[in-house]
Image (spheres, rainbow, N blue to C red):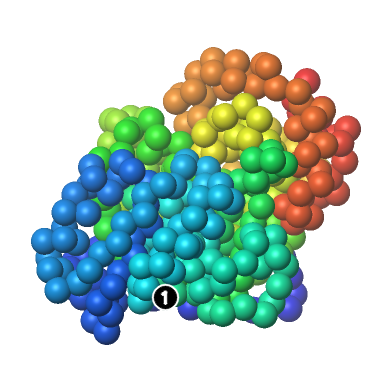
Amino acid sequence: MSESFFFHSPVKVFVEKDPYEVLSDFLSDSCRIGVVSGKVAILKTGFKEFLLKRFPDKEFFFYDDISENPRINEVIKGGRFLRDSKVEKVIAFGGGSALDAGKACSIFATNNRPFYELMADNNYEKPIPLLAVPTTCGTGSEMNHYSIITDLEKMDKVNFKKPDLFPKYAMLWSEYLKSLDETLLLWTVYDAFSHAMEGYLSKRSNPFSDILAIEAMRLILTNLKSYSNSKKLNLSKLLFASSLSGAVILHTGTTILHALGYYLTNVHGIQHGLANALLIPRYLMMCEGKGVEKIDVIRNIEKELHFSIVDSIKDVLGDRLIKLLSGVDTEKMVDYASNKPNSLSTPFVVTKDYILRHFS
């Protein structure tokens, strides 16, 4: 934990507040509204129909060409669409991919420039104000200024971030999670736990982020225990925990676990949350093997609940916990992850041999 630290979270968050009230406030001074999403959730949840029916005085421009892992060309194209549509506000609706893409589109709308040029430059026009509406309980993107974008040519995920990319508003409405496939929902829960756990153990953690991380882990584990016993989940609490985790990694970043997961997604097409679930048991063993003291706090939470994150992962994945990693070139995976900025926040010195030992 850092001895000297700061804590900053500028997002105005509305938890389970009537969406009409939240949107009315956000859109009050605007007429032309851009909406960035994927193609499915916005229809399954009824959100598109809701906007068109409840706000007949607004003109909406929908951009739904966002992939599960948003690509550079998609956010450049989305930025152009918002710019040409002359929108005054942006709503990003969906899972982490849609929220990350929405943030990126909002800044490319005001900056007609190549991706990496804008990424490297601190002089730019401010993005269009954005409201983030998560439809999964794993992203936390609504709480931070990160935009994880896939570079297909380099087979890499890059973190496009700017101080001005924070959403103005975040709307947590758990009803939108009910249309999510149960399996995908669980993957996103593991992603949220990974954010909280990695953030708590990170070299960059601070007392504020630790408080949020502990509460997020406790909420998630309580719900996963309930799911293990009765197949029931409290979506509202999981969505809240996900946002807490998003605020955690805003300050701590993630660690080599996430970098390893990026490789599994980029090269093997394993869904991001599932990739993290595969890695969590091994990462905990790595931390214990290096004597990371804060791991004891996580173990104490598990003892209090008589349930562990590894119990949950084994219960849900079964033999897939081993099979899904059987065809992975672990040396290439570790080489890739070791060179990602995430690895610098890992609470022990990262060496290739030590990481590989946990995949043998």
Is residue 180 visible from the viewing direction of this image? yes
Quarter-wise, where is residue 328 in the image?
top right
**Depth check: 214 or 268 in front?**
268
Hey, what amino acid is under mark 1? Answer: Pro
Q: Is residue 125 left or right of residue 158?
A: left
- Quarter holding the N terminus? bottom right
Circle 1: is it few (<14), some (14-19), or many (20+) Cα within 10 Å? many
Percent across and percent down for residue 317 are 49, 23
Q: Where residue 31 appears, x then y in whole percent?
A: 25, 77
| Left or right for 312, reference 18 | right
Q: Residue at x 41, y 67 (%)?
A: 84
Residue at which label 1 appears:
129
Q: Nearer the viewer, residue 48 or 226?
A: 48
Farthest residue, direction bottom: 29
Quarter of the image that includes the C terminus: top right
Counting labels gives 1
Foreground of the two, 295 or 29: 29
Residue 303 seen:
no
Is 195 rendered above or below residue 268? below
Seen at 53% across and 66% down, the residue is 108
Residue 322, quarter of the rendered image: top right
Instruction: Give coordinates of residue 87: x percent, y percent.
Output: 35, 72
Question: Which x, y percent locates residue 184?
Answer: 40, 35
Residue drawn at the location 67% of the way across and 80% of the way down: 123
Relative to 266, does residue 86 appear above or below in the rendering?
A: below
Residue displayed at 12% across by 68% down: 56
Question: Disc 1 on helix, strand or loop?
Answer: loop
